[in-house]
Image (tube, rainbow, N blue to C red):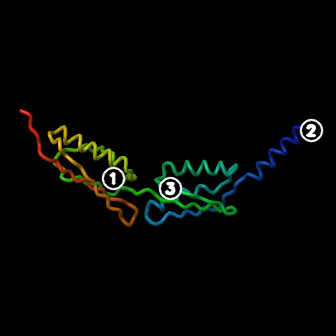
Amino acid sequence: MNLITVFLLFLFSLCSFANVNVKSVNVNCGKGLECKNIKNNFKTLKRNYVDFNHLDTVLKLYTLNSGIKNFNYRTTGDKLIINLKPKLKIRNVKISPSSLSLPSILPTREDEFFDDNKVEKTKSLIVDLYRSKGFPNVSVKNNNKINSDNSIDISFKVDKGRAIKIS
């Protein structure tokens, strides 16, 4: 046997030990439509992986844009078990009173995933808009109602305060 053959056999044996073969995927994520969608997306994880690092990288990529808040996983033989918590999906956004014409592209929108930062940015934009219309003492509070289907309703209550007119 020459040196190249021995080296190739060595590499092949390393790859065969590190190979991860996933034949079934079990996703635990609760109830609701969003969980069903996530389960369907994760079915495509049934395949061979070079090693556990490869599997870990693929799982992280899957979770980036799938509306997943957090997750963990483990393998048992050829079975992949994933436990995850989906993000809340915004079902309803209400702003009251809506005496000013508000931009339709506020950061907090229906049918998107809930994000505290976007809620705060929405509040800030509403405050800025009211201040620009002569209400410097405006305040905005939000109330979030989590629904049984893993969705959330968000209401913004605007207290304009007294208007100031500059003569």
Looking at this view, is 45 or 118 the one in front? 118
Q: Disc 3 designates what residue? A: 70
- Residue found farthest to the left: 167
Q: CA distance from mark 3 to mark 1?
A: 22 Å
| x then y, percent, for residue 33 | 43, 62
**Residues at badges 3 and 2 in contact (C-beta under 8 Å)?**
no
Callout 2 amino acid: Asn
- Residue found farthest to the front: 137
Q: Is label 3 in a helix, a strand or a loop?
A: strand
Q: Disc 2 designates what residue? A: 2
Q: Disc 1 designates what residue? A: 110
Sooner in the amino-acid sequence: mark 1 or mark 2: 2
Residue at the (85%, 41%) spot, across then down: 7
- Residue found farthest to the top: 167
Residue at the (18%, 52%) spot, across then down: 97
Q: Nearer the viewer, mark 3 or mark 2?
A: 3
**Residues at badges 3 and 1 in contact (C-beta under 8 Å)?**
no
Q: Is residue 124 left or right of residue 87?
A: left
For the N terminus, the quadrant is: top right
Q: Residues within 10 Å of mark 2 (few under 14, many from 20)?
A: few
| x then y, percent, for residue 107 | 33, 45
Q: Residues within 10 Å of mark 1 (few under 14, many from 20)?
A: some
Callout 3 amino acid: Asn
Q: CA distance from mark 3 to mark 2?
A: 50 Å
Residue at the (12%, 45%) spot, across then down: 162
Callout 1 amino acid: Glu
Q: Is residue 136 left or right of residue 92?
A: left
Q: Is residue 129 left or right of residue 56?
A: left
Q: Which mark is residue 160?
A: none
Sooner in the amino-acid sequence: mark 3 or mark 2: 2
Sooner in the amino-acid sequence: mark 3 or mark 1: 3
